[in-house]
Image: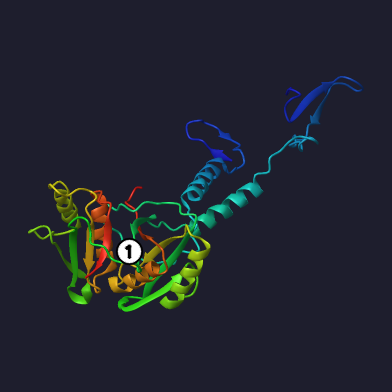
Amino acid sequence: MRYMPGSGREYRSSPLSFNATPMIDVIFLLTVFFMLVSRFASAESVKMLLPEPDSSEAKTVKLPERIVINCRPAVPGSPAAGALYSIGPNPPESLAMISQRLAALQADRPDLKVIVRADRRLRYADVRAVMREVARSGLEMIHVAAHTARGE
Amino acid sequence: MMTPRSRSYRETTSAGTGDRDVVHFRPRRKRLPPRRGMLTLNLAPMIDVTFLLLIFFLITTTFDLPEGVLASKLPRDTGVSVPLPLSPIVIRVDPAGPEFADYTMRLDNASQVPADFNELASMLEEIQNRPGFDDETPVVIMAGGGVRWDHVVNCWNAAVRVKYKNIMFGEG
């Protein structure tokens, strides 16, 4: 029994009920939002700090025949300690091994494109070593990964 | 006398020994179960699944910056080197500062030293407008081995921004 001021009488209130409709609306909106913005990390991309140029001209392109070479610091937080190189998600390999594999892949797939993903804190000498190996394996083009401009 | 619609009502009868009040009790009306065959939507499993999806996406979503690529041609390691048809624009970048985090930069074709990469892009654009230079003029980035990769990519990006087509790397 509840007393309603001003009504001058008591009345029997209806049993409490939970209106789930607004909650379902919000949950649906959140779910759709996260489904749209989620981009599942590519298995070939190792987590690292990519170069972030001012007014970046880097473009997102789809390269069907591609190979990704990841270069990341051998000792995290100490880029001068050298780099670890790996093809896609594979464990780190020596540059000589990467060069051999590149040459074999290039013989099978002439349209192969190479993307070099290098940590921005690395020294140029460490990345240049990879670029030399790519050139040595007979590939003409190289694509360097960098962050695109914000908002693109 | 109360109406028959109320919970209980009184009725006066005159049969037998005289007038008598009979109170009929009408039990409270119970909610009827849904009729057989009536369609009902059970929302509970849907809400369960939606919650699971929401939690999954909340946990797995990471807001990373999108990444793209800057394309360039590599010099062939074999063959005979040929002289460049045009006098190239040379950007020299060298390491400086503690742990080579900083850099020094200069353009061979300009007396002024660019303060940052935006100024480098402006100077490259100005050179492009000079007679004898255009967007086909080769741009060579001569970077020291100790320079951070970030600075080299920034130089490359500055040249791409002002639409140079032949950008290459040289040994610093």
Query: Seen in the image, is A140 located left or right of residue B18?
Result: left
Q: Which of the two residues, A92 or A63, is positioned nearer the viewer here?
A: A63
Q: SS of the residue at dot 1?
A: loop
Residue A84: give x, y in percent of width and height: 40, 75
The 10 Å Cα crowd at callout 1, few under 14, some 14 to 19, many 20 or more, is: many
Q: Which of B25 and A78 is in front in this view?
A: A78
Q: Mark 1 points at which residue?
A: B75
* Residue B67 at x, y percent in the picture: 38, 56
Q: How many labels does the image show?
A: 1
Is A16 displayed left or right of B161 in the figure? Answer: right
Residue at 31%, 62% (x, y): give it: A51
The N terminus of chain A is located in which quarter? top right
Q: What amino acid type is highlighted by mark number 1? A: Pro
Q: Name the residue at 22% across, 56% down.
A: B85
The quarter of the displayed image where residue B93 is located: bottom left
Compared with residue A95, is residue B6 higher up or lower down, i.e. above or below? above
Which residue occupies the extreme top position in the image?
Answer: B14
Residue B19 placement (x, y as % from top left): 84, 21
Taking depth in this image into account, of A123 and B25 the one nearest to the observer is: A123
The colour scheme of the drawn protein is: rainbow
